[in-house]
Image (cartoon, grey):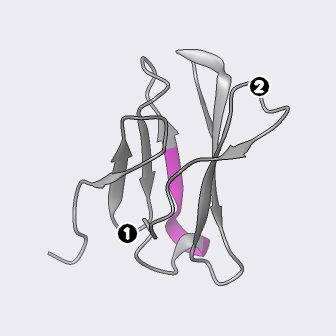
Amino acid sequence: MDVTIADPDVIYLVSADTGFAFNGIYKSTNSGRSFTRTAETNDIFNSTQAWYDLAITVSDVNPDIVYVGVLDIWKSTNGADSFARLNQWDI
């Protein structure tokens, strides 16, 4: 989970299922009183390592820029509705 100083009302939560695979990104715009799943449905984890090295962070200057990482690092510029992969861990 992460919150940004750019807009403290915006909180992001990354979720893994019981098999440690991608289960969604959730966003709150009301300081965590409620969360809505974002539009991203692709498996941006590309692994089942969420139990070990799952991370999420939000830009300090733009609440729509979000990074998620497990083995690969993914970046969203539209509030976590879609992500682009920035690296490939095994290359």
Q: Which residue is mark 1?
A: 71
Compared with residue 67, is residue 45 higher up or lower down, i.e. above or below? Answer: below
Place residue 23 in its image quadrant: bottom right
The furthest residue to the right: 33
Is disc 1 in contact with disc 2, using a CB cutoff of under 8 Å?
no
Compared with residue 13, is residue 44 higher up or lower down, i.e. above or below? Answer: below
The furthest residue to the bottom: 19
Q: Which residue is mark 2?
A: 31
Question: In the image, residue 72 lies at what x, y percent?
Answer: 33, 64
Q: Secondary structure at mark 1?
A: loop
Instruction: Give the camera-side residue of 20 and 25.
Output: 25
**What span is in magenta?**
51-56
Question: In the image, residue 20 lies at what x, y percent?
Answer: 61, 78
The furthest residue to the front: 39
- Residue type, numbered disc 1: Leu
Label 2: how many Cα within 10 Å (few below 14, some 14–19, many 20+): some
Question: In the image, residue 67 lies at what x, y percent?
Answer: 42, 45
Q: How many marks?
A: 2
